Amino acid sequence: YYIAPEVPKEWRQAMIDGVEDWNVAFEAAGFTNAIQAKLAPTPEEDPDWSPEDVRYSVIRWAPLPIANAMGPHVGDPRTGEIISAHIIMWHDVLKLGVDWYYAQASPMDPRAQRIPFPKDLMDDIVRFIVSHEVGHTLGLQHNGKSSAMVPTELLRDKKWTHENGTATSIMDYARFNYVAQPGDGANLMAKIGVYDKFAIEWGYTPIDHAQKPEDERSVLDAWASRQVGNPMLRFGNFSSVDPTSQSEALGADSMTASTYGLENLKRVMKNLQSASNKFGRDYSELSRFYGAVWSQYNLYASHVVGNVGGIEKIDYHVGRGGEVNRHVSKDKQKRAVKYLMDNVLTTPEYLLDRSILMRIGTSNGSSRVSSAQSRAISGLLSSSRASRMVENETINGDKAYSVAEMIEDMHAEVWKELKASKPVVDSYRRTMQRSYVSTLASRAGGSSGDLKAYALDELIKCEKAASAAAKKAGDTATRVHLQELSRSIKQVLENKNGSSTAGGVSFPFPFIKEPVEDDTHLGCLSHPPTTAHKH
């Protein structure tokens, strides 16, 4: 790989290191010094050399405000031979790396507790990004299952993480180690992992006796079967259904990993102003990194939601392993809902630092809280999730976590203030309760099957709770809020005076669109299923 002349000098060595990191994987396949990185020749050294020449594999630098990188390659479809591999680094991928690292790992790394980051830390980030893109040029896809094959507590282990990184593959979207805690001494970045070595060995090791492709099948099958007994060698594309194949996630247990992540976000919030504020400057950097904290918070919630109604897929083939699909355990699903009730529907006060919000705008807090809570409620109450939960209940009986149990758990959290002798509901919680009722109303009219029935039943319970609590409310805001909710729910149930309709049921609330569940990664720029992969 040649480092193109336009690449800034300060990043060239980090790029060389990122390329040559892959030699450890090729050594497992029997090759020494298989990959080299060099600076592009000068015009004096080679006047005919061009980065556009298909004979050369080149890392290019695009000085554009695009926060991404891409590692496409040109291959011979007859043989699989990779003829040419080009990597594009857009300038703002550095900015993206800084945002991620600050929100995820700065409590464990003193270098990251002040913006801008020092040169050695930026070198590490550039090296990590380049290594990932080189993997694509070698033919490797994103391995979303990689991170979930690592027991969560291992991510706090100094020895294991320094030997293995944060996942089994650098090709996962497993960014930086938000599970580690201060004092652990754990490694904070991904590196070429055991899956990467396995994949390169499987893909590149010569099978000398084979005279034609069919002769390789039995050997390749035997190699691939090592995944049955060793989960760290497994592969899976990103999936919204399989919680062990999620993007941006770490560890085998989303709830444990996300709880550790929240502890670090609390530490980040305490450091936010001292890290980003500069004397005489405006607060744009403070706003940027506050947004990065919220982005991370929302990722944790999305990882946890994926466990509810989740189905883990293990790519077993005939004669090896067991069932390909298995439902997430009842206990794990129930823990997932509890996490969301405790950490999302319960207002995250630590993210609403007054001294920050009064500098960047108070709506930055309230709107983000509302959005996070609305996404969690809508995500849990999605038709596709409910369908999977009903299927689970049909197959596994009382071993399954049912839709009825989930709604009961949600109800207890949403209306917990109403148990008081004189209930008071603050503005954040009032907005959340409206979102809950609005989502139920949309499901009652826009869904079919069991979820519609459950939503109507829950609306009846919500109306009774709101109506009774309004009579004993501890302040005027709570009273009028509960009265309005009661009236609105009655309109839905009685199909009278609604502002919009769907499925024969009126909606006096804004219609809450159901989340779309597919296997497209939504955390960064997506890419088509071709050889042109993006970071």
Image: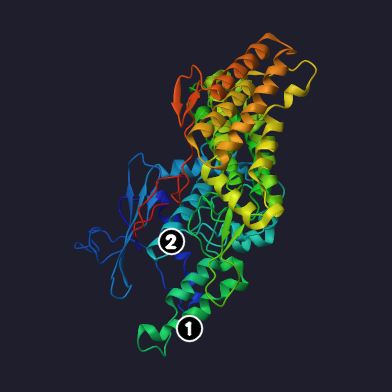
Picture quarter containing residue 312?
bottom right
**Where is residue 2 shown, x and y percent of the image?**
33, 61
Q: Is residue 318 above or below residue 380?
A: below
Q: Is residue 477 above or below residue 317?
A: above
Q: Is residue 238 above or below residue 269?
A: below
Identity of the residue drawn at 36% across and 39% down: 65
Please state, as top left, top right, bottom left or bottom right, where the N terminus lies in the image. bottom left
Q: Secondary structure at mark 2?
A: loop
**Where is residue 10 shown, x and y percent of the image?**
42, 49
Identity of the residue drawn at 63% across and 11% down: 480
Indicate the amino acid at tag 2. Gln
User: Which mark sits nearer the N-terminus, 2 or 1?
Assistant: 2
Indicate the amino acid at tag 1. Val
The residue nearer to you, when weighing 264 against 530, is 530
Q: Is residue 356 above or below residue 78?
A: above
Residue, disc 2: 141
Cα–Cα gap, marks 2 and 1: 22 Å
Residue, disc 1: 219
**Where is residue 301 shown, x and y percent of the image?**
59, 40
* Coloration of the structure image: rainbow
